[in-house]
Image (cartoon, rainbow, N blue to C red):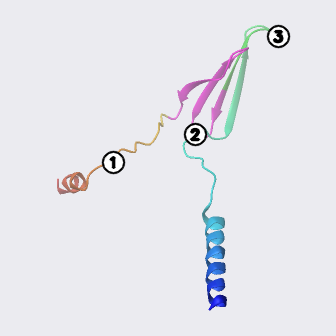
Amino acid sequence: MLAKRFFYVSAALFLLALTYHLGARSAGAQAGGTVIGVAAYFYQPGGAGEYVVATSGGDVYRKQTGGTWQYQGNALGAGPTVTTSTTWGKVKADYRK
C-alpha cells in the first residue's frame, strides 16, 4: 500500500514537471518587439540630435539628446487588441441577421 501511494505521488510530480516544461513560456503579450530600425539626426556636428527607433511591432520611439525615450505611436496603425466580453445572446443575435 505504501509503495502504491509513493508511485502515485511520484507520477503526479513527474507529470506536473513535464506539463510545466512543455507549456511554460515567458510573458510577452503586447511587448514592443525587437528593434528593427534606428535613425539618428544631428542638427549640428557634436551638438543636439534626435534618435528614432522602430520595433518589429510597428511601435516608434523618439529621444532627443539628453532626454528620455517617448512613444510616438504605431507606424502600422495597430493598437491593442480589444478584450471586451460579450453575452451569448448577443453572439446569437449577430449571427441571426
Label of residue 65 in the image:
none
Drawn side of residue 89 relative to residue 46, left or right: left
* Front label number (1 vs 3): 1
Q: Secondary structure at mark 3?
A: loop
Q: In this picture, is 57 found above or below 96?
A: above
Q: Residues within 10 Å of mark 1 (few under 14, many from 20)?
A: few
Depicted 89 relative to depicted 53: above or below:
below
- Tell us which disc is closer to us: 1 or 2: 1
In the image, the segment drawn in magenta is 53-76
Amino acid on which the number 3 mark rests in the picture? Gly
- The residue lying furthest to the bottom in this view is 1
Q: Is residue 60 magenta?
A: yes
Q: Residue at x 62, y 92 (%)?
A: 1
75 on left or right of 44: left
Instruction: Decide: is 21 above or below 88.
Output: below
Residue 4 higher or lower than 71, as above or below? below
Check disc 2 and report its element: helix, strand or loop: loop
Tell me, yes or no, whether the two marked residues, 1 and 2, touch with CB atoms within 8 Å.
Answer: no
| Labels 1 and 2: the sequence-earlier one | 2
Instruction: Calculate the distance from the C-alpha at mark 1 to the C-alpha at mark 2.
Output: 25 Å
In percent of width and height, residue 30 lies at 54, 42
Q: Which percent across, then down, holds residue 23?
A: 60, 64
Q: Identify residue for label 2.
A: 57
State the CA–CA distance, disc 2 to disc 3: 32 Å
Secondary element at tag 1: loop
Residue 4 placement (x, y as % from top left): 63, 89
